[in-house]
Image (tube, coloured by chain):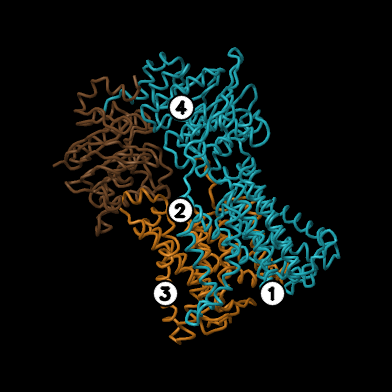
Amino acid sequence: MQILFDNLQVLFQGLALGSIYALVALGFVLIIRATNVVNFAQGDFAMLGAYGMVLFFTTLAWPYWLAFGAALVAMAIFGVLFNYGVYYPLRHRSFLPVLISTLGASIFLQNTVLAVFGPQPKPLEKMLNTDGINIGGIFLDSQYLMILIVTVALVAFTYLFFEHTLLGKKLQATSQDKDMARLLGIPVALMISITFVYSAVLGGVAGVLVGPILFVSIGMGSIIALKAFAATIIGGFGDVTGAIVGGLLLGVIESLAAYHISVPYKDAYAFLALFIFLLFRPQGIFGEKVSEKA
Amino acid sequence: MALLELRNVTSHYGNVQALKGVSLHVEAGELVTLLGANGAGKSTTLKTISGLVQATEGDVLFEGQSIKRTGPEAIARLGISHVPEGRRIFPGLTVRENILLGASNRKGVPRKQLEKEADEKFEIFPEIKPFSGALGWTLSGGQQQMLAVARGLMAKPKLLLLDEPSLGLAPLIVQNLFATIRQIRTGGMTILLVEQNANMALQVADRAYVMETGVIVTSGPADELSQTEDIKRAYLGG
Amino acid sequence: MQRLSLPWLIVLGVIGLGLALLPYQFETSTYVVQMFMQAVTYAIAVLGMVVVLGYTGQINLAQAAFFGFGAYGVALGTVSGDINFWISLGLGVGAATIAGLALGMTTIRLGGHYLAMITISFQQIFDLVLTNWIEVTHGPDGIAGIPRPSLFGYELEDDRAYLLFCAIVLYLLMFAVWWLPNTRLGRAMRSVRENQLAAEVVGVHTLRTKVIAFALSALLGAIGGGLYAGGFAYISPDNFNFMRSVEFLTATLLGGAQSPFGGVIGTVLIVQMPEWLKHLPESLSFIKDVYLAVYGLGVILIMVFLSEGIWGLIKSIRAKFVKPIARTDTTGVKPLDLELQGADAPPLLQVQGLQKFFGGLKAVDGIDIDIQRGTVHALIGPNGSGKTTSLNVVSGIYKPTGGKVVLDGEDVSQLQPHQRAGRGVGRTFQNIRLFASLSALENVMVGAQRDNNDVPDGNRGLRERAMSALDFVGMADRAHVIVRNLPYGHQRLVEIARVLAGRPKLLLLDEPAAGLNQTEKGEFVELLKRLRGHGLTIFIIDHDMGLVEKVSDRITVLNFGRKIAEGSPSEVLRNPDVIAAYLGTAGKVN
């Protein structure tokens, strides 16, 4: 019985961790679809969001939710800057220069934050003032619960936004066929900016959510980003549902494997899962088999 | 003043000079067709009008204003709707959504109004009405073409550019499609139609131009041209 | 690639030697020597990046892992295993090469972003193993007391002696890497970088080429790492993490990925940069603190403004002063010898019941075509009738959904494009696919080096064949022009020469006259007639009926993926069904 409880406990934590991967992966996928570029600084969006919270809440001592709002606004502005600084000048080039440019951005962001905040990891308050609740022998930490709740809310919002608003449809149209979108009068450059903003905000939320669990540190984004990217491949490259399912799956695999096998290699399981998928199902869970037609 | 006028337009597609001094005009209310063999430069002509390809020399005038340096989004807002070759349906959006986005060039129209107009389009193209909620890619070629034209009409254009609408469609569907094009034209729309199906195009058009390797070689009223050997020559090189 | 002349080589050699001996000339601190040591060993790893990224165009974000293989090979071998330095280095390099082969194999179906991710994952797992497998790797503490080797009985114990030795290794490897592009393998690599599909169809075994590139990159990385371990006597996992891989990548791009010299320049700059920042005036000293941030910004700026790197900049400056070879000397070019075939033998190519479906779309739906030896056979039909798809199935780009492709009595339906090229199938593309940044001669040499082509081994034979092929199409005097700079019509001709140099049994031409003007078309018809005169079998798609009528012996007409007519030009072009298919249905608009 105790074993079952322990496993459920681990599963719960895995889902929460997976939610973080899912949020960042969602940001990844939105940018991949809009620009066909993998943004290697995606994890640093989470890192920035968390440091924004450190600045507004811990340092400036603003009320929690005001600080949260300010951090997200800052992330939105950052999304625009990122688009015009890192992606836009290279939009006509092949994927490789853009990919490397985002890598450069990642180094730049991490070290700028390092210069401002110093190397010491910062603690961050939980969202709620309670430790958590105990349901039938399983302890549900309040922050883990909030992660799950906020993720569900954000995924639902994303779904409504993309599926039920005309703006969402225009964003989708832009990612499916830019020239056609242009011919219909859809302002493509604006659509791409909006995508970056949305993706940056998603990343920021993920950072604020995970901050209290992991401590806020310069490198927190890198490892999250790699897992999130692995999640997008496992779920199906460029597939929105796949990113979410892949993220959750990775979180669960990782937590269970760490619990049952070995903790030090916790980070390796995700990559192992990735290799297995790439070998046996490279198109991912939801991916269509890559069309042959040239 | 012609609605659209091309004056000695030159343009390049990649490193090929695709247009070598093309001049043509379309008057308001006309259906003009542009004929020619593959690679003659017909599609490039349309792309140069809608801004996807920039003219290197000459000028493109729409309602008397030069649009040579205007981008495709802005040209769409001026009232030119380009239904490109290969239909270019958004595969991941539903039929209805595809139609609604056709109005992206019009600012500040309430969603309700757009939905109403979309319903009207289904009246013109009853074949696609049953698929309103289906994703674009699930449609057959003929249905996709209907959808592409319906989407183009949502822009409420002053000029409709149609690029090879009959491409890859079975004969019966082509007849059906051209009947609809004639119907749209009767409703007062100005259309520039690029076609490889010369027989059909000449039946619905007022005037025609024939292109060969980037230049216009013949032009005239459609019924006259259909009697000449020029047309056969343009296609079969004989 | 521009060849350096002998005087230049000597100058470079002298400069290099001078630099290597620099530590000898001054009474330098250990610190400075170490910096040189770092630059030299990193540069060797960067040479690997030049091969895989610069030459072959494959992203590799795991070079630090390969570097680590070499370093840990030496460290574990000498310290834990008490084995000789050279044997340890060999083991490390061997392990790295095997890992490189494995990583290269993943390119069989994954490129681009996937490859970036795979290599990062590999890098991360390597890092995790180094840190956590403490019993073997000593974990985060690293390994100390790594000895230096002796060479021919001479102990390289002294810092400067060891550095000199490393510098010489770097030199030798640098010149080897510099030599590589003009070998068969190097040309294959560059053709993969420029246009993988075209490379495969021309006869390059693209997968093997990419795997070798990764293996070479791993090998060079491990040599650098092994020497690094000897140089610093102490290593720990943080010398070999992802950031180091990014550093190698940045050095490569900064210097110019396509040149080993550029790579070395880039490495020196990257290693020296923190040093220079130390000498900044007081007012600018804050930059020191944000050095890595500046570095990240630098990466973006390089991508935006200096896409060819410093070496590319040097080359473009040089190009302003040095006139490129405008006319290539064509004296002594031999005429192209094209195989003659008996016209009474069975058909050269038999397409039987061929089908190719894409999902529900039946692009080709059961066609039969026999192509007789020594004839020109045309395939025509309206847009979307399945012509190019058929050609793609014949050349192996697509596998058929049903039916067979039989070449010379052998069923080749399941063979890869390069295997078919090796059996004498050559083709050109509708939208020219040349290797844009290679010269016309190099493009054609890639065509000449297909499997089973009877050219003498070595560059000389290939070059002679390529010049003959260029001469045949009238482009011999433009042999040294980078094809990107050629006018469109000339590019068409180079593409045909590239196929002819492989001396094909069967020549597939996909709309070869598209985009040509009337004069060029006329010349092209003459070229086709000459080819037929040599007994070549040609299968051609074109929309210009005048041209098709002039050159072809037989015509097959497709519509909606099916054959609707076949026969001599005069029969087919008067066939009412064909006329209807082209002019559109004779139906009335209701």
Query: On the same chain: label 4 and label 3?
Result: no
Q: Residue at x 65, y 66 (%)?
A: C241
Subunit of label 4 = C
Q: Do labels 3 and 2 share a chain?
A: yes
Q: What element carries label 1?
A: loop
Q: Mark 1 lies on which chain?
A: C
Question: Which residue was labeled with disc 4?
Answer: C541
Question: Which hue belongs to chain B?
Answer: brown
In-front residue for pair A214/C197 = C197
Mark 2 to mark 4 CA distance (whole Å): 32 Å
- Dot 2 and dot 1 residues touching (CB under 8 Å): no
Q: Are marks 2 and 1 on the same chain?
A: no
Q: What residue type is labelled 2?
A: Arg
Spot occupied by residue C396 in the image (x, y as percentages of width and height):
57, 33
Question: C222 left or right of C405?
Answer: right
The kind of residue tagged 4 is Ile
Q: Which chain carries label 2?
A: A
| Same-subunit check for callouts 3 and 1 | no
Where does label 2 land, which residue?
A: A93
Q: Name the colour assigned to chain A in the rendering.
A: orange
Quarter of the image where one finds residue A196: bottom left
Judge the density around disc 1: few (<14), some (14-19), many (≥20) Cα neighbours within 10 Å: few
Nearer-the-camera pick, C48 or C172: C172
